[in-house]
Amino acid sequence: MSKELLKDETLAEKLIKRGFWIYFFSFLIAPSGYIIKLLISNDLSVEEVWVIYAILWFISILWNYNDLWFTESLKYFLPKFWINKKYDEFKTSIFLALWIQTFTAILIAIWLWFGADFLAQNYFHSVYAWNILKVFTLFFIFFNIFNTFDTIFFAFQDTFANKFIEFLRMWWIVIFVAILFFTNYGSLLNYSIAWLVGMIIALILWSYYFFKKYRWTLDKWKLIYSKKLNKEIFSYAWWVVLASQWWMILGSLDLQMIVYFLWPQQAGFYTNYLSILGIYSILLWPIFLFLFPITTELIEKKQHWKLELMMSIFYKYFVVIWWIIGLFFAIFWPYIAYILFWEKFIPSWNLLQFSAWFIFVSILISINFNVLAGLGKIKQRVKIIYVAAWLNFILNWFLIQKIWIIWAVIATIFSSFVMFILSYFEIKKSDIKINFDWLFYVKNLLILGILWIIFYFSLNYLNFENRLEILWKMFIFWIIYIIILLVWNYKEVKILIKQVKEMR
């Protein structure tokens, strides 16, 4: 029976089959939030819509600090305990996480419930907020329990269940909101209840699935009290808290210093640039997070060679893929900016034109940081972020004052390179060797350089009269661009197709 959990699989099975469900359901989930907002925005006043999303934002902040990331640490400890046959510790850590999540959630919920009137008047400044806060107080309790189940499935790489139930949760909210909207029963209170009902249904499904598939893992073993176990888990969680705080500081540092030293207009351009830049994380972050539990499993099973192979594959393909996307952004940035944001936000795309070439560094950092978490090197991750934050602050202090915001981008790129180098060498200390396919890099840089010259001069002979014409001509360029690169990398494409067929 134990073979059902964390059984040995090829990397192709892990990354392609399990990764498929991550992206499949992520793309299905993506429109749900937009549809919900579209419906309620057409039924409620601007102030009422703001109340719902302001409270959701407020709840998400409280959730981040609810159990001080104790549940997050389960992603590291559950695979570790299971593989090493420490079943009592495995069972104890799950029940401990559920108890802590529920207990702290109830304490915060009590504060929210009885403080609803005060928060409505003094924080949200809205007469509508007090009863909505009470609805989301219940939502908060259920969401924290839901998150514990979600973490357990993620730790065991059950990506289908992990994403499928999240998909059901979001689309149940869409269904309830749509019913209220089209039956004219829509109101601020009723739409808020739709969120709560969607969460309750998802939690029931989680509970059913968990007890059906994982109950046997808890029946046989006993709960134990161990100071060593508690200290180990809380210590890991504490470093995760510190990492999240320093990461938040690092992420907001550039913008805060631009606001302080430069004009508000430049802060607006930079904010828009960050929004555009965040698109890549939506596409890549799900698979990078998946590296965390995989790393822990491979390390505990002493399968270092699989981890080395996985990282080498990620280093090889994700770097070149982003060079390909970055070149396209660099060439067509004014046209893309015109289509999406008209001329007034073109300076934001000026920044992207420059930074697009270096986003591969952020991608490598994401890979390294999730691997470090899987290795249990969370303390070292905090130190790296700490160094980068101070370096970024010093560079911004000297470069940004009374100068164009491009220097904020340069400061971030420089500190990102430092983060990558430090995290890379930290991984090497664990005897993890990463192979760089330098020939593959050089080969693709060569063809990208040639294509950049051809496309750059070709654009001088094209006339773009309107947005639609820009769009279809850009699409043609993109098709030609991808075909050329696929032909150039024909052998690599054949190897990738062969790996997928072997997996099947």
Image (cartoon, rainbow, N blue to C red):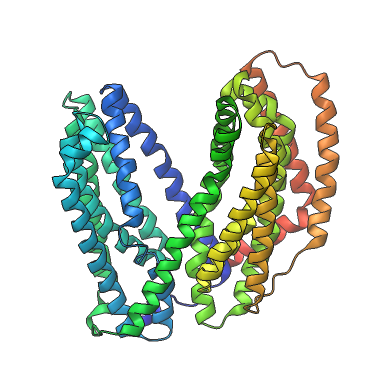
Where's the C terminus, which quadrant? bottom right
Residue 330: x percent and y percent? Answer: 73, 35
Q: Nearer the viewer, residue 10 or 464?
A: 464
Q: Residue at x 63, y 71 (%)?
A: 426
Q: Residue at x 30, y 27 (%)?
A: 39
Q: Is residue 186 left or right of residue 405?
A: left
The single residue placed furthest to the top in the displayed view is: 465
Q: Nearer the viewer, residue 111 or 3?
A: 111
Where's the N terminus, which quadrant? bottom left
Seen in the picture, residue 99 relative to 356 is either above or below; the reply is below
Q: How many marks?
A: 0
Q: Is residue 134 left or right of residue 80?
A: left
Q: Is residue 138 left or right of residue 401?
A: left
Residue 287: x percent and y percent? Answer: 52, 57
Seen in the picture, residue 66 relative to 6 is either above or below; the reply is above
Q: Nearer the viewer, residue 331 or 4?
A: 331
Q: Quadrant of residue 129?
A: top left
Residue 121: x percent and y percent? Answer: 21, 33
Q: Is residue 132 visible?
A: yes
Q: Is residue 22 left or right of residue 63?
A: right
Q: Is residue 497 visible?
A: no
Residue 40: x percent and y percent? Answer: 28, 28
Seen in the picture, residue 410 relative to 2 is either above or below; the reply is above
Q: Residue at x 73, y 69 (%)?
A: 435
Q: Nearer the viewer, residue 65 or 121?
A: 121
Seen in the picture, residue 143 relative to 83 is either above or below; the reply is above
